[in-house]
Every structure is written in C-alpha cells, then in structure tokens.
C-alpha cells in the first residue's frame, strides 16, 4: 500500500507491506515516517487545530490546538466539545484550556498570547 | 527627522526576521506595519506545520510568529503599527519615507530599506468566470479571516476553485466547523498544493479533488446560489457536455499568490517576470542601491521557515550595507527551472555562502541539480523528487572560483 507521509513538508512517499503481524515501511527519509505509517495502518491519529469562542471584544475567537495527536475518529467529537466552550479568562500562549481530552493524555492549548496584551 | 540604518516595511514573519537580524548587526532599526497587530498572515494561519525546520517543532502560525515577536520585543527595534508608507524618495545617502498614521503625517530617514510586504491572493480568475457577482465569492484567505479571526462562518455549502495550499487548508477548516465542501476543482492536471495537504485536508475528510476541472459560471442575485463546473482538456478548453450545476452559497478561490510590490513599482525597481518579485543579488538587494527585498514579496514561499531565513539574509545585509560598487553577473538556468532566487550574484560581495532557492518547472524523479562555472561543474546534488509546489534550497560556495563580469554561472537539472 502507498501512503504519503504528512509529518513534515517533505511528504515522503511510503510503501507499506503487511505480512501478518509484520509491517514493513520503505521510502521514509526519517524514522517518523515509519511511526506514521504503522499508526496509519493500526490506529490513525491527527493533531487538531481550531478556535474557541471568547468573551473578549478584541478577540472573538482564540486559536487552539491539541498538544499531541488524538485518534482520527475523535476529531469531530473534539470539535463538538469545543463548540460549547467559551473562554472567559485571559490566558497565555501554551496554556491548556482542556486537559486529557477523551483520556488521550492530550491537552488542548492556546496557540496565541493575544489575550495577554492590553495594548491599544 | 529620525534617522535609521534600516527601515523595514512589513511586520509579518519576513519583516520581523529582517528587523531582528539587522538589530543583531548593531543597526538602528525601524519597523512599519499597517495592521493593528504584528504577525502578518500567520495571525490567521491557525493550522500547524510551521517551524519544523526552524524550531524542529510543529507549531501553528500564531505560535511561530509570536516567538519572533517575542525576539523582536527583546531588541531596541522601534516598531509601529497602523502605519502606512505613502511615499519614498531617494536622497543623499539613503531614502526619506513619508508615513501616515493616527498621529498624522511624519517623515523618517533610512540608509537602507527592506521591503517585506508579503503577497496578495490572485483574484483575476473572479473576473473570468461568467455570470453575476453575488456575495459569496471569496478568496481562501478572506474565508480564513472570517473563520479564524472574526469567528464567523462564511458558508454552509461551498465549492473551492484551485488546489493551492490555503484552499486545501480551508477545505478542512470549513468542514471541521460544520460546512459542506462539495469539492475542490483544479484546472491543471496536477494539484498546486503540497501532497501532505491533499492527504490531511482532503482525503481525511473524504473531500473530492477534481483535477482538470474548472468553474465556468456563477449563479445568484444577492447571494451565490450555484456554480457550474466543467472538465477541461489538455489545452484547458472546456469539454462540451461535462458541465454540471452545483448548488452552493459560496465559491472559494485558491488560485495563486502574487508578491505585493506597490512600493517597488513606485521606485521603478525591476521585477523578475517569473517570481513577480524584485530581481535581487545574493544579499537580497534589489537592482536599486540600498533597497532589499525578502519573504513573499520577493517570491512566494511554501514554508515560513524559508521566509524567516530570507528575512535574515536581507536584514543582515541591509545592516552592514556600504554603498560600494556592485559587479553583478546573472545566474543562468536551463529550461527545467520555474524560477531561481537570487537571479544575480555580486562578485564584490561575499560569495562563499550563497543560498539559492529554486522550483522546477515540472515534476522530476531522480534528478541531478548541477552548478557549473564557465563550463566546469563545481557542485551537484541529487533529488529523488522535485515538484513545482515544493521549493528547494541549496548552499553554494563560489569562493574558490575565479569570477569576473564575463563568467557564466549555469544551473541545470539533469534527468
């Protein structure tokens, strides 16, 4: 099976062969390609980037992301969870707004510190 | 009038990197941004994948650029926002810039100028499609601004024209936020965006990509109601009988980016027909003495990491600029290149660490990149794959070569 690695912009073209329990991966320029291909064949995962609503006038939404990958089939569950979320305190870049989503060990963190700046 | 060694126009990733780099060389630097916040387009690029080269981390756009803003804040660079440059005039030893902002009109002097004005989305295609011009025809960047900055959804069901990276990213983004993306239509037989974006933005969400297809008509009075799509042949002529009407409330255009060079035009700076940015030497100085260019204003980059790198080249060289005579020679290429940056080499400037950025004109597999000087091969590099959407960069050392104004530096790609 052929895959394109999405870990980095190199976009290595990977060839995956599955023989029973054994998964062989070729075509990767780095070890991350192999990890990606195996995950893709067993439990595909993705990081999610989106925004959450805030109560602050200067920033109606704040960008956030997962600080790791969650199972691919949980992406829309996470979107639904964040749909009901309204941020009402000023947080720093990197600060978590939700911890350990779906017991994945992954947090949702703010990716901008724009709420910390009170400058006009 | 305040005087500076380096005046940077544009406070996005290129401008910030240029300002920080110039400051490191002990220059007195002034940075001008027209928006309310520094950061340029990265403020709205909330997706990740930025900084893999620079920081060895997968960051979102805001995270990447805010790291640079943090660096900038630790310097004595003066940065102003909500400020426009309305005029630039050459004077003895540099340039005077007229600035307009809420405090009125002011003038500053810069020994050198770095143009870091970014690029604009192509909208020409909007004009070529038949039909009315109802609300609902957006560029991908505008749709991105609505969703990621204003927090508003511009569509419930849309068609995307063009497979540029922002279009692909927006296909995913709009789908995540509950819109239906009917499909992405690309007039060329190959996608314009990075392969990984085809995979993670389209395949992951079962969004169809229709290659060799285009939008031929728009329908609707006040608001877009439908578009017509059709298949095209190799000559990009519409194949009769393939037309199909799709009901939708938005048409999102991702049909390319063009360097923004209004300031360069006003200074009569020669532009490169291929990059649509200024022609530069290896110091990123344009053909106008003391005026440098970097980032997407110079050529449209696919990775911000390269934008930062280019900003540093321009900023550093602007800081150490001495008005000495240049001896420029062209870098020549064979027909396999879409473009190269820089286009010229100043043999009076350092030539030991020249960074060459290039794109191939089409897909190549197992290719050799060859540099020769006066017919003698001085460097080769092998590439397993070269694709026009994926820019490559190489370091070139010419310090061991005897160069004069009639030397021929030639780049070739051999299959």
Image (tube, rainbow, N blue to C red):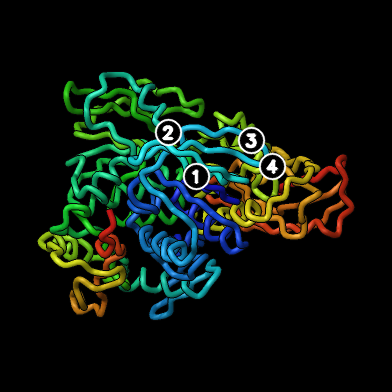
Q: How far apart are marks 3 and 1 (CA)?
A: 18 Å
* Marker disc for residue B309: none
Name the mark nearer the viewer: 3 or 1: 3
User: For mark 3, what is the residue?
Assistant: B91
Q: Can you give x and y, in whole percent of width and height, for residue B246 in the image? A: 23, 31
- Marks 3 and 4 sit apart, C-alpha to C-alpha, by 27 Å
Comes first in the chain, label 3 or label 1: 1
N-terminal-most mark, 3 or 4: 3
Whether residue B172 appears in this view of the structure is yes
Residue B343: give its label: 4
- Give the label, 1 or 2, closer to the camera: 1
Observer-nearest of B271 and A59? A59
Residue B122 image label: 2
Between the C-alphas of marks 1 and 2, the distance is 22 Å
Q: Do the residues labelled 4 and 1 touch (CB within 8 Å)?
A: no
Chain ID of residue with mark 1? B
Contact? badges 3 and 4 (CB < 8 Å): no
Distance, label 4 to label 1, CA atoms, is 22 Å
* Same-subunit check for callouts 4 and 1: yes
Mark 2 or 4, nearer chain start: 2
| Image position of B377 (left or right of A5) | right
Considering the numbered disc 2 on the image, is that residue within a helix, a strand or a loop?
loop
Which residue is depicted at the point 65% across and 40% down?
A: B286
**Mark 2 or mark 3, earlier in chain:** 3
Q: Distance between the residues labelled 2 and 3?
A: 35 Å
Q: Does residue A71 show up?
A: no
* Cβ–Cβ under 8 Å for marks 2 and 4: no
Give the mark, 1 or 2, whose residue is nearer the N terminus: 1
Whether labels 3 and 4 share one chain: yes
């Amino acid at each position: 099976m052929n895959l394109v690695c999405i870990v980095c912009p190199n976009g290595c073209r990977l060839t995956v062969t599955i023989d029973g329990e054994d998964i062989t991966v070729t075509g990767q320029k780095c070890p991350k390609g192999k990890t990606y291909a195996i995950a893709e064949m067993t439990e595909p995962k993705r990081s999610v980037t989106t925004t959450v609503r805030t109560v602050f006038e200067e920033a109606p939404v704040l960008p956030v992301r997962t600080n790791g990958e969650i199972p691919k089939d949980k992406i829309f569950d996470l979107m639904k969870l964040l749909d009901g979320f309204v941020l009402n305190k000023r947080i720093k870049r990197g600060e978590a707004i939700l911890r350990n989503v779906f017991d994945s060990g992954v947090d949702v963190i703010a990716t901008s510190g724009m709420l910390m700046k009170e400058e006009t | 009038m305040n005087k500076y060694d380096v005046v940077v126009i544009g406070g996005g990733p290129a401008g910030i990197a240029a300002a920080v780099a110039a400051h490191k060389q002990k220059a007195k630097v002034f940075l001008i941004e027209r928006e309310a916040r520094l950061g340029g387009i990265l403020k709205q690029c909330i997706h990740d994948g930025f900084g893999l080269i620079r920081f060895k981390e997968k960051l979102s756009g805001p995270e990447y650029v805010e790291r640079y803003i943090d660096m900038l804040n630790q310097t004595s660079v003066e940065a102003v926002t909500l400020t426009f440059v309305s005029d630039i005039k050459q004077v003895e030893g540099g340039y005077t810039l007229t600035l307009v902002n809420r405090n009125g009109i002011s003038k500053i002097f810069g020994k050198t100028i770095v143009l870091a004005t970014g690029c604009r989305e192509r909208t020409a295609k909007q004009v070529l499609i038949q039909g009315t011009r109802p609300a609902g025809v957006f560029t991908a960047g505008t749709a991105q601004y609505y969703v990621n900055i204003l927090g508003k959804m511009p569509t419930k069901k849309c068609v995307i024209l063009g497979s540029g990276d922002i279009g692909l990213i927006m296909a995913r983004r709009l789908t995540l936020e509950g819109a239906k993306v009917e499909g992405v239509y690309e007039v060329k037989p190959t996608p314009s965006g990075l392969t990984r974006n085809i995979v993670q933005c389209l395949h992951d969400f079962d969004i169809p990509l229709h290659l060799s297809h285009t939008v031929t008509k728009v329908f609707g009075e006040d608001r877009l109601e439908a578009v017509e799509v059709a298949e095209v042949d190799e000559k990009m002529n519409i194949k009769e009988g393939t037309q199909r009407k799709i009901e939708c409330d938005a048409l999102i255009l991702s049909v390319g980016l063009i360097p923004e060079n209004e300031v360069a035009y006003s200074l009569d700076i020669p532009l490169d027909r291929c990059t649509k940015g200024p022609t530069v030497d290896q110091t990123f100085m344009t053909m106008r003495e003391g005026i440098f260019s970097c980032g997407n204003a110079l050529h449209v980059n696919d990775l911000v990491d390269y934008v930062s790198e280019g900003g540093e080249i321009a900023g550093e060289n602007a800081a150490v600029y001495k008005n000495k005579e240049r001896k420029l020679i062209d870098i020549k290429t064979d027909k396999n290149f879409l473009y190269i940056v820089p286009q010229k080499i100043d043999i009076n400037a350092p030539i030991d660490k020249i960074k060459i950025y290039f794109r191939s004109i089409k897909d190549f597999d197992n290719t050799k990149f060859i540099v020769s000087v006066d017919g003698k091969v001085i460097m080769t590099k092998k590439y397993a794959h070269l694709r026009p959407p994926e820019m490559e960069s190489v370091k070139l050392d010419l310090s061991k070569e005897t160069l004069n104004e009639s030397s021929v530096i030639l780049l070739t790609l051999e299959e």
